[in-house]
Image (cartoon, rainbow, N blue to C red):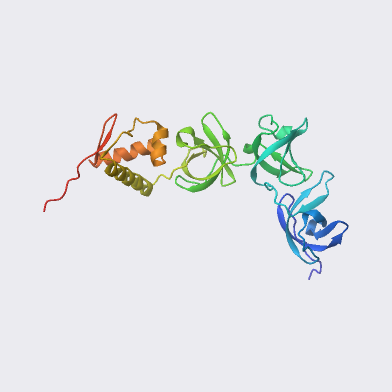
Amino acid sequence: MNSHTVKFTTHIGKVNTLPVSGKAGDGFLLDGGDQGEIFLPGAQAPGDCAAGQKLDVFVYPENDGRLVATCTTANGQVGECALMKAVHVTRAGAFMNWGIEKDLLVPVSQQQTPMQENRSYVVYLLLDPQQRVIGSTKLHRYLEETTESMAAGDEVELMIAGKTDLGYKAIVNGTHLGLLFKSEVFQPLRAGDTTRAYIKKVRPDGKIGLTLQQQNKKSRTELTDRILAFLETHGGSSTLTDYSPPEAIYKQYGVSKGNYKKALGALYKRRLIRVTKDKVTLLPRTRPPG
């Protein structure tokens, strides 16, 4: 039987649970497993820190490559995307506010467009060949742009990555890139915003189309019920037609113009409403005899 103790792995650029080995100078030493001892400055340690205690710490390399730890939560870990502000721009790249003492470098070669000081960007965090944590705004290098595992109707979590001519590029479940078309958006969105959304469609080439509104039978039925309720409580008519501006429709019902038009069409086919260019009118409901 192998008598050697198998060392655990400490992940650079991530939160790790590490035991305190003992005190060292103005801080503490942590058992970093395969990374050896890692220094935790006293200013970054909890007040009751003592040998044998296990701490959740963020581990990152200093400029000289030496690993250090902090109990402060960093704004983003390796393998994740995070919104960060550029605090200093140099020839080497942009230094981003990482939420810890050290700033995060986004090298010029990793910038999708030249970054500007005091502007915020969605950055993907990764380890470079020298095991330094760096950032990249070239998200397409690290996130999947096609999918075989997602399907229309799936609920997902989005982070808005930026605006395009067609709408918004968005990070889907932290692993993929998709597109949220302008016609699907009727609320202010900025880079870094997170929201629940749905897969609208997966194109034949695997590209992901997104929507902020659920599109299934239940949601369509709920919308037609809400339209009928509105008409019944507003004198049987409404000036919100399928010619109305998308913003006005979203303000009233929180849905896209396309979904609203489909709901009006369904009610019209059921002979519950009359639709003209200027008005939607509730028709008298036919009651069964007796």
* Occupied quadrant, residue 55: bottom right
* Occupied quadrant, residue 24: bottom right
So how many labels did they put on this image?
A: 0
Q: At x 77% / y 44%, what residue is drawn? A: 102
Quarter holding the N terminus?
Answer: bottom right
Left or right, 192 with respect to 202, comes to right
Left or right, 209 with respect to 30, comes to left
Left or right, 18 with respect to 277, comes to right
Which residue is the extreme one toward the left?
290
Which residue is the extreme one toward the right?
25
* Occupied quadrant, residue 111: top right
Which residue is the extreme one toward the bottom?
1
Residue 87's x, y, as percent? Answer: 72, 36
Is residue 204 placed above or below 287 in the rendered structure? above
Can residue 231 be seen from the camera position used here? yes
Work out whether residue 249 or residue 76 is closer to the camera in this orientation and state it.
249
Can residue 41 be seen from the camera position used here? no
Q: At x 79% / y 57%, what residue is drawn? A: 34
Residue 73's x, y, as percent? Answer: 70, 51
Q: At x 41% / y 38%, what residue is drawn? A: 251
Is residue 282 placed above or below 38 in the rendered structure? above
Work out whether residue 2 or residue 248 is closer to the camera in this orientation and state it.
248
Work out whether residue 225 or residue 158 is closer to the camera in this orientation and state it.
225
Work out whether residue 127 or residue 61 is closer to the camera in this orientation and state it.
61
Residue 224's x, y, as percent? Answer: 32, 44
Residue 89's x, y, as percent? Answer: 74, 32
